[in-house]
Image (spheres, rainbow, N blue to C red):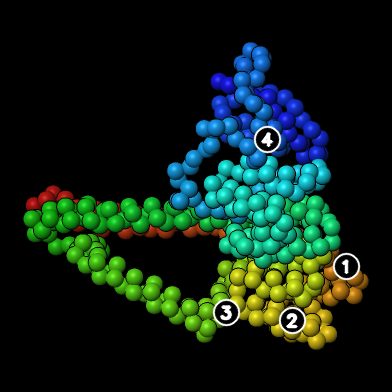
């Protein structure tokens, strides 16, 4: 296993030197990343500490011939919010350590493992090196970086506080990833249980029940209603499954076309907010994202009207988006933020009250941060409660399904046994 001598930067910006016995450059990067050290230079040395075998390489600037990593799965990979979050944190740490932007981008590119994001950031580095503003180089890749992202960087470049804005942006992206992961993680277990239950039921309907049905038919027994129901469902699934598939596809296509219309999208989003439990959770998530995003943008120096336009796209609900659009128009005419939000009736009184206090005291950014933290905590509590509720519900559902199958199969057998004993 080769030994690599390296030079890097720790989280405090100090230069760090050392050597590691690892299996390749990729393993070296991963090991240093776990120590919060960002690789800037490396070279391969003899395992016994002798002279270096390879020339020193600047991370992200040069590679030894033949050492280029090729990911055959690049075309199948995607860029996740977590990838962007980790890259943002790495870049923010380097900028805080007063590393020049182009050099920091080069080092960050070398740390990235996702091939698509690596290619995007390499293009960003090239554009910046050729004189383009950092935010504009990012804005070209708007499918990777949201408007919130590059507008905050634009404000940081304009004000000369890019390092501070990048640290704030790193905190922001990490908080959004954590919120997303908590929600997805809470829904994963119930979804897996539901899929497994459906597969088991379908397997029994298609393979087990037909065998038992043939046996009952041979015996000529008078079957209970529950058994006849099970046999009918099994035969229907075996003979007409394609009808069900066609109906599902048609229903899905019809739903998509309806939701693509203005009226359909409005009705769907409005209906979601009225669903018991789910609607309240979706509203809390939207308010948490609105507050966190708007507060972060304002702290980064983005003008209020521009920030309001950006946050319209983060709430992911057309009803709330229209409220924010009306609020932005009212602000342009001299109104406050709290007034339009209160008149809409879509934002809780506590949120409106805290925003109003923030506007009057000049502490709007801090108030928005407090609102986001409060609602993120409420989302955590509600998601945990829903998870603890969904698990027993899934167990009860599976128990009912299994009970139905067992009863439908055992009841006729018990009747046959009794008939044999009496005969």
Residue under pointer 2: 327
Proximity of marks 3 and 2: CB atoms separated by less than 8 Å: no
Q: Which residue is labeled 1 in the image?
A: 363
SS state under label 3? helix
User: Can residue 339 be seen at all in this image of the molecule?
Assistant: no
Question: Is 338 situated above or below 27?
Answer: below
Instruction: Provide residue 350's location: percent of width, then percent of height.
Output: 78, 72
Horizontal side of 269 relative to 354 (left or right) equals left
User: Reading the chain from its start, which is encountered first: label 4 or label 1?
Assistant: 4
User: Which residue in the structure is indicated by mark 3?
Assistant: 270
Residues under labels 3 and 4: Cα distance?
Answer: 54 Å
Q: Secondary structure at mark 1?
A: loop
| Side of 324 relative to 364 (left or right) | left
74 sits left or right of 214 in the view: right
Residue 94 spot, x, y in % from top left: 76, 44
Tell me which numbered mark, 3 or 1, is placed earlier along the sequence.
3
Q: According to the image, label 4 marks what residue?
A: 58
Q: Is residue 277 above or below residue 381?
A: below
* Classed neighbour count for the residue bearing mark 4: other residues with Cα under 10 Å, few (<14), some (14–19), many (≥20): some
Q: Nearer the viewer, mark 4 or mark 1?
A: 4
Single out the residue that lies furthest toward the bottom: 333
Q: Earlier in the sequence, mark 1 or mark 2?
A: 2
**For the residues marked 1 and 2, what is the alpha-carbon distance in whole angstroms?**
19 Å
Nearer the observer, 336 or 30: 30
């Amino acid at each position: 296993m080769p030994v690599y001598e390296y030079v890097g930067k720790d989280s405090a910006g100090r230069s760090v030197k050392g050597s590691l016995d690892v299996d390749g450059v990729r393993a070296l990067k991963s090991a240093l990343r776990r120590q919060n050290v960002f690789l800037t230079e490396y070279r391969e040395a003899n395992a016994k500490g002798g002279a270096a075998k390879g020339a020193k390489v600047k991370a992200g600037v040069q590679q030894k011939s033949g050492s280029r990593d090729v990911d055959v799965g690049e075309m199948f990979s995607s860029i996740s919010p977590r990838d962007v979050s980790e890259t943002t944190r790495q870049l923010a740490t380097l900028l805080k350590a007063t590393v020049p932007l182009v050099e920091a981008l080069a080092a960050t590119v070398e740390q990235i493992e996702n091939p698509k994001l690596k290619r995007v950031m390499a293009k960003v580095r090239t554009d910046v090196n050729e004189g383009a503003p950092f935010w504009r180089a990012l804005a070209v890749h708007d499918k990777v970086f949201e408007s919130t992202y590059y507008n905050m960087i634009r404000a940081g470049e304009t004000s000369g506080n890019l390092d501070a804005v990048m640290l704030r942006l790193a905190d922001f992206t990490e908080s959004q990833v954590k919120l997303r992961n908590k929600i997805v993680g809470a829904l994963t277990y119930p979804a897996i249980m539901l899929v497994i239950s459906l597969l088991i039921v379908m397997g029994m309907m298609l393979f087990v029940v037909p065998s038992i049905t043939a046996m009952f038919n041979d015996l000529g027994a008078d079957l209970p209603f529950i058994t006849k129901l099970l046999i009918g469902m099994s035969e229907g699934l075996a003979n007409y499954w394609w009808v069900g598939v066609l109906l599902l596809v048609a229903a899905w296509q019809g739903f998509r076309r309806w939701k693509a219309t203005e009226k359909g999208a409005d009705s769907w989003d409005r209906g979601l907010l009225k669903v018991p439990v789910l609607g309240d959770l979706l509203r809390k998530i939207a308010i948490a994202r609105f507050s966190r995003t708007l507060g972060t943008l304002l702290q980064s120096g983005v003008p209020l009207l521009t920030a309001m336009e950006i946050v319209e796209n983060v709430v992911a609900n057309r009803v709330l988006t229209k409220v924010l659009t009306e609020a932005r128009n009212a602000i342009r005419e001299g109104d406050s933020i709290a007034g339009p939000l209160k008149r809409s009736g879509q934002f809780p009184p506590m949120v409106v009250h805290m925003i109003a206090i923030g506007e009057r005291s000049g502490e709007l950014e801090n108030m928005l941060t407090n609102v986001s933290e409060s609602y993120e905590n409420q989302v955590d509590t509600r998601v945990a409660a829903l998870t603890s509720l969904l698990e027993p519900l899934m167990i009860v559902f599976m128990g009912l399904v299994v009970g139905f199958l067992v009863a439908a199969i055992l009841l006729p057998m018990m009747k046959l046994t009794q008939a044999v004993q009496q005969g």
